Image (tube, helix red, strand yellow):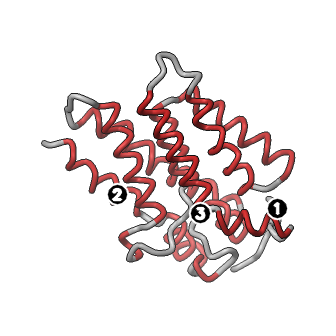
């Protein structure tokens, strides 16, 4: 099997809209029509509560972890590290632009990116997650915490030994990608209109 065959598998796994499925199965609602309209764990938390948000968050993270961790083991190649990153990117793109929703209305990729990082560099993932958690605890802005953690990721990856230029380049890509997917949040933060963690929108 050629390693490239893992790309559509990764994309399809990333495209599974866990938030949409959970909303419809458990509450009979389309989350694209509630809260922020985003199919990410934060909107699930605000709209449906932690009991639904926790498994959605875990599922979205596993969508990134499994392709990046399992597929390089299952599909032999001369550069499993490069293919692991490539599979991870495909899963993230699937989450943000899911084929099952015609390429629209996905999440912003943070949980899936976290899963990819946990597979590729677990120690650096823990550091980045700690940064995320600290920013959330201080500000209660999940979006700001996501942006800060992503922006510091390339520098965190510099701590890995031996240093991996490919992985650092991936970190730079992720930093730019997460900031781009959060551009509307950045605008709301600047205007002082961004919702803080703990603000429940309802939606049942």
Along the line of sight, the residue nearer the viewer: 25 or 178: 178
* Label of residue 11 in the image: 2
Residue at 67%, 43% in the rendered image: 149
Distance between the alpha carbons at the discs numbered 3 and 2: 17 Å
Quarter of the image that includes the C terminus: bottom right
Distance between the alpha carbons at the discs numbered 1 and 3: 15 Å
Quarter of the figure with residue 82: top left
Instruction: Single out the residue that lies furthest toward the top.
Output: 162
Residue at 44%, 25% in the rendered image: 164
Instruction: From the top left corner, tell me how far across and down residue 16 is, in percent.
Output: 41, 63
| Residue 59 as seen in the image, left or right of residue 49 | left
| Residue 38 as seen in the image, left or right of residue 142 | left
Quarter of the figure with residue 35: bottom right
* Label of residue 106 in the image: none
Along the line of sight, the residue nearer the viewer: 10 or 164: 164
Question: Where 156 falls versus 100 (above or below)?
Answer: above
Quarter of the image that includes the N terminus: top left
Quarter of the figure with residue 38: bottom right
Label 1 vs 3, first from the N-terminus: 3
Location of mark 3 (residue): 40
* Label of residue 196 in the image: 1
Q: Are marks 1 and 3 in contact (CB under 8 Å)?
A: no
Instruction: From the top left corner, tell me how far across and down residue 91 is, in percent.
Output: 40, 53
| Residue 191 as seen in the image, left or right of residue 33 | right
Q: Are marks 3 and 2 in contact (CB under 8 Å)?
A: no
User: Could you say whether the residue bearing mark 1 is in a helix, strand or loop?
Assistant: loop
Label 1 vs 2, first from the N-terminus: 2
User: Could you say whether the residue bearing mark 2 is in a helix, strand or loop?
Assistant: helix
């Amino acid at each position: 099997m050629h390693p490239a065959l893992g790309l559509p598998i990764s994309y399809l796994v990333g495209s599974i809209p866990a938030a949409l499925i959970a909303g419809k199965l458990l509450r009979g609602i389309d989350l694209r029509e509630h809260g922020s309209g985003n199919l990410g764990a934060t909107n699930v938390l605000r709209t449906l509560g932690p009991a639904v948000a926790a498994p959605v968050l875990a599922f979205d993270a596993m969508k990134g972890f499994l392709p990046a961790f399992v597929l390089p083991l299952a599909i032999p190649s001369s550069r499993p590290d490069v293919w692991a990153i490539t599979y991870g990117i495909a899963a993230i793109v699937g989450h943000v632009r899911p084929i099952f929703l015609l390429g629209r209305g996905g999440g912003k990729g943070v949980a899936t990116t976290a899963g990819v990082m946990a597979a590729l560099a677990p120690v650096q993932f823990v550091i980045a997650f700690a940064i995320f958690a600290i920013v959330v605890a201080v500000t209660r802005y999940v979006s700001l915490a996501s942006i800060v953690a992503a922006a510091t990721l390339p520098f965190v990856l510099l701590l890995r030994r031996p240093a991996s230029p490919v992985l650092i380049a991936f970190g730079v890509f992720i930093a730019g990608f997460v900031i781009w997917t959060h551009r509307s949040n950045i605008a709301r933060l600047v205007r002082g209109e961004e919702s803080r963690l703990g603000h429940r929108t309802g939606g049942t």
